[in-house]
Amino acid sequence: MILVLGGTSDSIEICNLLNKHNLSYFVSVTTAYGKEIASKCTDKVLLKKLTIEDMIEFIKENKIDKVIDATHPYAVEVSTNAMKACELSNTRYIRFERESLINEIDYDNKYLVETVEQACEVANKVGNNIFIGTGSKNLSIYKELIKNKNLITRVLPTSEVLISCENLGFNADNIIAMKGPFTQEMNESTYKQYDIDLVITKESGIAGGFLEKVNACKTLNIPVVIIKRKEMNYPNTIGNIEKLIDLINIY
């Protein structure tokens, strides 16, 4: 039995691959939207934020022998917990990691930072209409640390996310509720419509439309802040979904 740690578009592709090969699995997600999407692949969906202890218990109760970590590249805490849980329960761990595209950027007007807090430092010095393209998770930090700027955020169009945005003080003029990924042309149109003069994004890879965001900035000569991935020492990492099945069979 396999446990897929999901919540990403990659995890859905992995579920489809497991279905194709008739392999049994559970999917763990942390949001209602994630559960809705995963439920289209399987009825074995767990909606819960798992601690190390939770994960070990679930692994033992469901006789899990492999964990495929397909969480977002920035979900560092989840991946750290998963690796520790697998170590303690003697369960095989496989990390699916989206390919980094940071070296493919051909644009000088960029700021590479390590954290959201560092991105806020740049935003306080550069730009007035700031596009936050990192999702809803860290909006409270942006709201707290960026002073006297107009913040525009693009988030998933779910009631849960929109309520959290409104609770932070974002209103209809500051929220773009759409599901990505987005083309370069759509990003350019959005940046123009909101008169954006600084973009903050994460190094999210192909599935996250990372290059489309940056290339739109390049076309419009808008500075971009890129929050880099934290370097993690993942064991058994693979970045090709089609080759994942081979690793599952031999590992």
Image (spheres, helix red, strand yellow):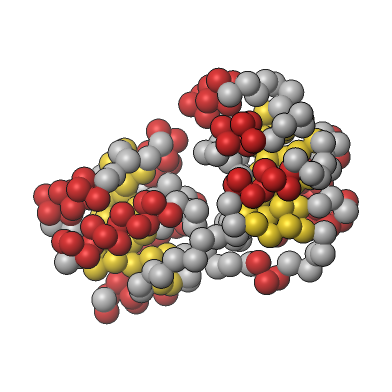
Left or right of 113 on screen, residue 76: left
Left or right of 204 on screen, residue 36: left
Residue toward you, 108 or 248: 108
Q: How many labels does the image show?
A: 0
Left or right of 52 on screen, residue 9: right
Q: Which of the 4 image quadrants contains residue 179? A: top right
- Which quarter of the image is occupied by the N terminus? bottom left
| Residue 88, horizontal then vertical, whole percent | 18, 62
| Residue 99, horizontal then vertical, whole percent | 55, 68
| Residue 24, horizontal then vertical, whole percent | 23, 57
Q: Is residue 145 visible?
A: yes
> Looking at the image, is 175 positioned above or below residue 77?
above
Q: Which residue is drawn at 38% across and 65% down?
A: 95
| Residue 141, horizontal then vertical, whole percent | 58, 36
Q: Which residue is drawn at 17% across and 66% down?
A: 90
- Which quarter of the image is occupied by the C terminus? bottom left
Residue toward you, 223 or 174: 223
Q: Residue at x 30, y 38 (%)?
A: 48
Q: Which residue is drawn at 41% across and 57% down?
A: 70
Q: Is residue 156 visible?
A: no
> Looking at the image, is 248 positioned above or below residue 230?
below
Identity of the residue furthest to the bottom in this view: 250
Left or right of 156 on screen, residue 197: right
> Looking at the image, is 94 positioned above or below residue 177?
below
